[in-house]
Image (cartoon, rainbow, N blue to C red):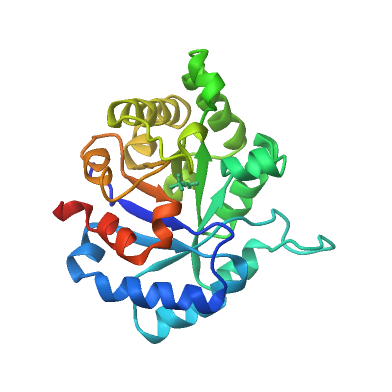
Amino acid sequence: MSRTPIIAGNWKMHLDHLEAIQLVQNLAYHLERADYEASELVVCPSFTSLRSIQTLIEGDRLELRLGAQDCHWEADGAFTGAVSVGMLARLKVAYVLCGHSERRQLFGETDEITNRKVRAVLAADLSPILCVGETLEQREADRAGEVVLAQLRGSLADIGADALERMVVAYEPVWAIGTGRTATPADADEMCGVVRRTIAEDFGEPVADGLRVLYGGSVKPGNVAELMRRSEIDGALVGGASLDPEDFAVICRWHRL
Ligand code: PGA
């Protein structure tokens, strides 16, 4: 089965809405039709920039898709500071990151919380990008596969195979995020394969065949092509390098490198 690749930029807590607009304008200037045809191109700004970027995308008819970095699982209520999936859907957000390792490590989010978010995103007909990945300690103890498998099963509890059609998983080893240390393409490919096999076991081969599995962790212009050549890797979740429009444009151009 051929899977449409995804290149997604996760801006984290960078860029105010004016800087975000500038970045997208600059990025769009560097992108060509062939780049939009080769992959779905996604940007995930902070909540305060979503509306501005949505307006820019619509006004300039850009083919970029919008992603959010997080959400709350309830539809509404007394949850000070939280943003619901319904609010994101109204801004034409297509993707929502769930369980990013920074949410897990810095905000104490568990697989159970991630699972609630994934279910809320799926229920609203949006696509979750579920992030999983082991720490350096876990990798060195030879536990990477086991950790990723447990995160996947915990985060996908009580979800039916039908709902998984829109699901995206990002394998992001924690030790490679923001460190400049990338997993080797072979290691990244192997772990993306572990993700796909687990999904095949739990939800069946057709779901696993259609599932897009991204790699994330220090993806840069210099390593993206080699990563994308691997059969189990269907795209990249890019942090640092997505903040530079020229670098991110080169990453979006992986198919021509
Ligand atoms: P990085 O971040 O590309 O800066 O390593 C990736 C991520 O956190 O999604």
Q: Left of 50 or right of it: where is 114?
A: right
Q: Work out whether 111 lies above or below 118.
A: above
Please identify the quarter of the rendering in which residue 241 is found.
bottom left
User: Residue 196: x percent and y percent?
Assistant: 38, 31
> Which quarter shows the N terminus?
top left
Farthest residue, direction bottom: 59
Farthest residue, direction left: 256
Farthest residue, direction front: 180
Q: Nearer the viewer, residue 11 or 189?
A: 11
- At horizontal 22% and vertical 39% (from top left) the residue drawn is 226
- At horizontal 59% and vertical 67% (from top left) the residue drawn is 88
Number of marks: 0
Q: Left of 245 or right of it: where is 129?
A: right
Q: Work out whether 227 lies above or below 198.
A: below
User: Residue 155: x percent and y percent?
Assistant: 60, 36
- At horizontal 33% and vertical 59% (from top left) the residue drawn is 248
Q: Nearer the viewer, residue 219 or 193?
A: 219
User: Residue 162: x percent and y percent?
Assistant: 47, 44
User: Residue 201: x percent and y percent?
Assistant: 43, 24
Q: Work out whether 196 lies above or below 40.
A: above
Q: Left of 56 or right of it: where is 32?
A: left
- At horizontal 58% and vertical 60% (from top left) the residue drawn is 124
Q: Left of 50 or right of it: where is 247?
A: left
